[in-house]
């Protein structure tokens, strides 16, 4: 039984690092692109009887998701023994429920598509909603960036730390960090009138004289994050840093981050950065994913990577 690691075009750099840490070369994939934009990926080496890991984050455009589906289908039709979709960032995760009339549950539809394509297992990091694991009828390895972020937090010089959630949805995650670090907790409560636009925000908890660490699973337009950082500083915080797993960073995100009172934004490389900012620092998830792949192949426990949910 052998192992092959392939990647789609959206995650080439990360996949190369994962393969390197695993100890082998990345598999060869060729993508033929037709003049109308249609594309056809091809696995350029045999995968018969192999365990195939396909690395592809599924951030927009949706071609990234469809490319992953085509790669899974290609591996299945080429008689791979098992096919594991490694999605460091699981796009469409915000569509995890029907929160208004006549809308789709995109995360469930995506799960159905992946299973129909032929995946035997899913590996991902920091779902926007933990219950998405239940959308799959195959095993899901849901890793947490906390295994990386806690190490970074321990390096900080301050012992006067407060963990903050940028919204009510992140309260559980922030509370887990607070308990682990034995420090205070604050909550930023926001009210939206429409998506990606905050009408008002308030802070619950004492942050005066504290070094505040905002914890979140993703940063999209950075509106919530930067508004929370500025508000926390106005409430007397000494500094505000943010730890966000997925650097979506769309629209005005970079401008907002640069103009904000954030000291630093620490993100992972589940999504390649689309711009630059002196305030943004990237830590890699390659070692984590390669280690989990090794343990899956050798049937070892990976529970040590589930530090905080």
Image (cartoon, rainbow, N blue to C red):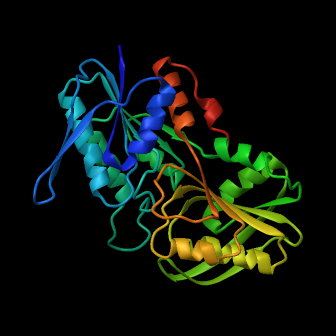
Label count reads 0
| Left or right position of 68 against 306 | left
Whether residue 219 is situated above or below residue 143 in the rendered picture: below
The answer to whether residue 136 is seen in the rendering is: yes
Which residue is nearer to you in this view: 169 or 252?
252
Position in image of residue 232 (x %, y %): 76, 74
Question: Residue lying furthest left in this view?
Answer: 35
Position in image of residue 273 (x %, y %): 48, 58
| Left or right position of 23 against 190 | left
Q: Quadrant of residue 19?
A: top left
Position in image of residue 101 (x %, y %): 36, 74
Which residue is nearer to you in this view: 35 or 171?
35
The answer to whether residue 293 is seen in the rendering is: no
Residue drawn at the location 61% of the way across and 73% of the way down: 258
Q: Quadrant of residue 138?
A: top left
Position in image of residue 118 (x %, y %): 26, 35
| Left or right position of 268 against 147 | left
Whether residue 126 is situated above or below residue 162 in the rendered picture: above
Residue drawn at the location 32% of the way across and 30% of the way down: 27
Image quadrant where one finds the N terminus: top left
Whether residue 81 is situated above or below residue 10 in the rendered picture: above
Question: Residue lying furthest top in this view?
Answer: 1
Residue drawn at the location 38% of the way across and 43% of the way down: 12
Residue drawn at the location 87% of the way across and 73% of the way down: 208
Which residue is nearer to you in this view: 223 or 99?
223
């Amino acid at each position: 039984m052998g192992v092959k690691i392939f990647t789609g075009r959206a995650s080439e750099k990360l996949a190369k690092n994962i393969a390197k840490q695993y100890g082998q070369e990345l598999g060869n994939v060729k993508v033929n692109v037709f003049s109308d934009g249609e594309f056809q990926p091809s696995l350029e080496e045999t995968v018969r009887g192999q365990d195939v890991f396909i690395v592809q984050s599924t951030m927009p455009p949706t071609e990234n998701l469809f490319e992953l589906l085509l790669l899974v289908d290609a591996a299945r039709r080429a008689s791979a023994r098992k096919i594991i979709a490694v999605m460091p960032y699981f796009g469409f995760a915000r569509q995890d429920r029907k929160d208004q009339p006549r809308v789709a549950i995109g995360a469930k539809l995506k799960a159905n598509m992946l299973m129909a394509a032929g995946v035997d297992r899913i590996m991902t990091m920091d779902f926007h909603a933990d219950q998405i694991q239940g959308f799959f009828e195959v095993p899901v390895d849901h890793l947490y960036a906390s295994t990386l972020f806690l190490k970074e937090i321990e390096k900080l010089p301050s012992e006067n730390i407060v963990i903050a959630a940028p919204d009510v949805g992140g309260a559980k995650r922030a509370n887990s960090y607070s308990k682990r670090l034995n420090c205070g907790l604050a909550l930023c409560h926001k009210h939206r009138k429409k998506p990606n636009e905050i009408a008002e925000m308030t802070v619950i908890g004492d942050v005066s004289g504290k070094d505040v660490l905002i914890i979140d699973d993703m940063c999209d337009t950075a509106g919530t994050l930067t508004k929370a950082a500025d508000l926390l500083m106005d409430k007397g915080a000494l500094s505000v840093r943010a730890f966000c797993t997925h650097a979506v960073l769309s629209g005005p995100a970079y401008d907002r981050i640069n103009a904000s009172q954030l000291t630093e934004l620490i993100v992972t490389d589940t999504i390649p950065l689309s711009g630059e900012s002196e305030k943004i620092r990237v830590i890699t998830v390659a070692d984590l994913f390669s280690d989990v792949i090794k343990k899956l192949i050798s049937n070892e426990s990976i529970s040590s990577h589930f530090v905080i949910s």
